[in-house]
Amino acid sequence: MGELVVVDIERALRGSVIAEEDDDASQVEQVRLTVPTTDDPSLPITVQVASLPLGHLLARVLPRRKFRAPALLGGGEWSLNPGPFNMKEHVLISSFANAGCAFGNGNAYAVMIVDIIRAFYRRSISFFAAWLLITTTQVLGYGWAGLMRKYVVEPSQMWWPGMLVQVSLFRALHGKNNEEENTVAEGGGGGMSQDKFFLIALACSFVWYAVPGYLFPPLTSVSWVCWLFSKSVTAQQLGSGMKGLGLGAFTLDWTAVSSFLYSPLVSPFFATANILVGFALFMYVVVPVSYWDLDLYNARRFPIFSSHLFMSNGTTYDITAIVNDRFEIDMDAYQRMGWINLSTFFALSYGLGFATIAATVMQVALFHGKEIYRRFRASQREKPDVHTRLMKSYRDVPSWWFYGMLALSVAVSLVLCTVLKKEVQLPWWGLLFACAMAFVFTLPISIITATTNQTPGLNVLTEYVIGLILPGKPIANVCFKTYGYMSMSQAVSSARWLPRRSTSGWRTGCWAPSPTSAKTRFSRRTARGRARVFFDASVIWGLAGPRRIFGTQGNYGALNWFFLAGAVGPLIVYALHRAFPRNAWVPMINLPVLIGATANMPPATAVNYNSWLFIGVVFNFFVFRYRKRWWKRYNYILSAALDSGVAFMGVLLYFSLSMENRTISWWGTAGEHCPLASCPTAKGINLGPDSVCPVVL
């Protein structure tokens, strides 16, 4: 029995790259099970519709009269009603809307710059500067996304797992394959249609989210260990899902599951397995040993899990006290207050971030370098799979469209960095440097995302580099990070929706980001956590600068060795792969994903990972292997339904209750009930009379 399980695990790990006998089919099994192999290029694609029901309504009521376009516009006939509302029109609407949702988080990254200036630094920024900053960072990455399509869109190995949810949902809502699957369903009888399954799952998700989202928030993190040991600091440090290691903690809130790593139903099993190993090693080996056994970096003076900045005595660092009138570091005040300290967890997270960056470059160079070089030289032509050939039926978007968008975005950004330099602190050459870094990293990070559904972050590297060049300028640092990291993230995000000319309307969506989408995907706690981490990063890398944190003038210089470790790791995996070419496990070790598993922590917490990993393993290993028919028909539909239900209820709660400040107060709205999890454990630390933490003598 044990041998059978091992064989099944090996098959699951290889499931993403198993090739069928039909060499015309996709090399990726999940793609073969989800994406159709036929297409009708004659279906019109328009921009007159906004949603599925409205589209069907307009198809019924709009006049069918045809008009002839002027010769100057190319001639030909057009109509307000080209025919029945079809799937391609629906796809266009979705791509348009997704272009307006930043890079997948539902809000513009640059908004946090405005937030920390006003909320944390208590300064001001003009509306015009803020508007230019947000707008330009939203569109900068779209330019070179198109330039990378040859390497990250056309190859069949670049399968973008997250897009399979969209494919399944579109097919279900438009009735594709429902009838035939109900009658001839892979060797068995029929079952519930996909559209009916979607509606039922959506309704359940919609109704349930009112409970953790408003009535009983502790269901977001059920930390039962804290409830059993209400007076033990160590037990609550171990058991808290939000402020500790999350031992045994779980969630019944889908937003907590999908907020940071996105839907676990989408992640391929080999990627989930890498994240599981990385998370377990870091959370349950490295952190406990560093905190309790080694007391690394005076770990026990601070909380075990925190993104805050501390003084050496364990109290919170007063950042505003070291900022002068020029919005730069006040060195006299800094010398009086002493060096900035991080929790050991936060410090080690940065070390893993260093390793992930180096591992990403090495991983892509070793495992994908030949393919990239071959395509660059165009020395030979690979036979395209069926889906790539289908896309050739549509006129391609000319490259000059992408060049033009890139040039315009850079030009407007240069205006911001020259005319309004006092507000953003970033010089014009800093902008160009950020763009260059983003361009270099877009290709390797796109390849990692296209094959694993996980995106290694570039933010740490951008912060580090500009912090060395322009220390003491926090706003310059976060602006550089946003232009470098954001444009790369936009490029990666837009590449998955990258169209032919027929669907080119997606680009304009980036100018109109949704004002409510962030409210539907993330809780207020998550939003505050992100803003807090963003602010602390501006202090670490900008105000203080990396030399005063990770250099000779700081406590954490040894973490720079993580760069070397990250670079060496893929070399070892590659050597093992060459030495044991028939081994099924070695090629599935993806160190950028494994090492960067906890890159979202903080603000992500242990409970976010626990439930994500559990659901991912259940559905993409057990269900995928032993109930493949069910997985094929419903897995991605379920993911879309859960997201949609939460989104609709989130909007309803926000407009009906949150905007009116209508709240309820009882034990079930008092948080996680793990107050001692944030306590230090070093002897003699006294946080004041208002603290619930006991003083260890």
Image: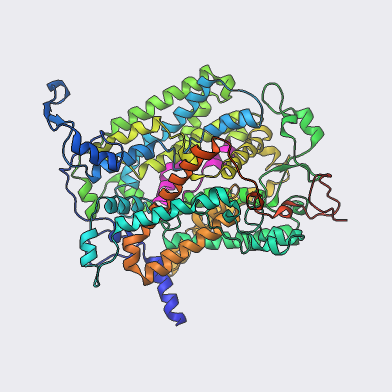
Instruction: Give the quadrant of the N terminus.
Output: bottom left
Instruction: Give the quadrant of the C terminus.
Output: bottom right
Residue at 69%, 43% in the rendered image? 308
Image height check: is 629 above or below 34?
below
Residue at 41%, 48% in the rendered image? 644
Left or right, 282 with respect to 636, comes to right
Q: Whole-percent x and y of residue 193?
A: 28, 60
Image height check: is 539 above or below 127?
below
**Near-viewer residue (60 or 306):** 60
Based on the picture, tell me whether residue 449 belongs to the magenta stretch: yes
Left or right, 30 with respect to 89, comes to right
Q: Whole-percent x and y of residue 238?
A: 68, 61
Span of residues in magenta: 440-465
Left or right, 332 with respect to 647, comes to right
Residue at 34%, 60% in the rendered image? 634
Residue at 63%, 63% in the rendered image? 247
Q: Residue furthest top?
A: 419
**Near-viewer residue (7 or 616):** 616
Q: Whole-percent x and y of residue 315?
A: 78, 43
